[in-house]
Amino acid sequence: MNFYVLTLFPEMVERGLSHSILGRAQKEGIINIKAVDIRDFALNKQKHVDDYPYGGGCGMVMQAQPIYDSFKSLDIKNGTRVIYMTPQGKPFTQKTAHELSNEEELVILCGHYEGVDERIIEEIVTDEISIGDFVLTGGEIAAMAVIDAVSRLKEGVLGKAESFMDESFCQNTLEYPQYTRPYEFLGRKVPDILLSGHHGNIEKWRREQSLIRTYEKRPDLYETLELSKKEKDFMEKYLTNKSESR
Ligand code: ADE
């Protein structure tokens, strides 16, 4: 899968994604990440790519021309999705990551300053994505988050296919707690069931822990779950115990 990132900070993107799992995935050719410097397409000597907003107001706006020319320099197929990272975009979720991981290539535009000239959005952008209700100084960190979440879903990027099957959000529940050695740390012991060797019981315990966690930490996600009769009974008991112990 090819990612093309249109940015004023190509090094930030390329270096930021050159480590660990994504670094290896690029070496193996499973994904390619190419950051294109928008500034290379400035037509003035000073290499300015921004200007004052029409109508006044604070901040600067990225001009359409250098972005457009950087986009036109890409050797991409017709119909390739062009994502603009912006806090005004559609909230990024695991579902969006799965959907995007089916694409062969993606272009991601990173804004800076007070944003980009609206006409570039009208002309080239197909999707606007936000990684959360907060404002970053630019789209690069957001683009890196999207590339990371999408890449790890491509076959061969993670070690084993199962390694992302159980995880948080795959079944709309949060992941169960994990433990490794030592058995005891600062007086806290690993739950005995995990040492029992009984896979069925461990599986059941993990599912129950996932349900409790989702209920406690993400009640909004819990509301969307479809629980089996046994799971509903378990949660009812948990909630009764909880209210009695208060
Ligand atoms: N650019 C600035 N803030 C952003 C956000 N929250 N999501 C995506 N892109 C952004």
Image: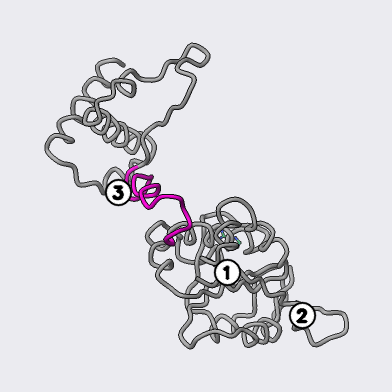
Can you say whether 136 is above or below 77 in the image? above
Determine crowd level at label 1: few under 14, some 14-19, many 20+ residues with C-alpha closer than 10 A.
some
Q: Are marks 2 and 3 in contact (CB under 8 Å)?
A: no
User: Measuring 34% from the left and 49% from the top, which residue is drawn there?
Assistant: 165
Spatial CA distance of label 1 from label 2 is 21 Å
Ligand 1 quadrant assignment:
bottom right
Which three-letter amino acid code belongs to the residue tagged 2? Answer: Asp
**Which residue appears farthest toward the top when viewing the image?**
187
Which three-letter amino acid code belongs to the residue tagged 1? Answer: Asn
For disc 3, the marked residue is 171
Splitting the image into 4 quarters, where does residue 38 fall? bottom right
**234 or 121: nearer the viewer:** 234
Residue 32 circle label = 1
**Which residue appears farthest toward the front when viewing the image?**
28
x and y, in percent, of residue 235 in the image: 21, 31
Q: Quadrant of the C terminus?
A: top left
x and y, in percent, of residue 141 in the image: 62, 58
| Lower position in the chain sequence, tag 3 or tag 1 | 1
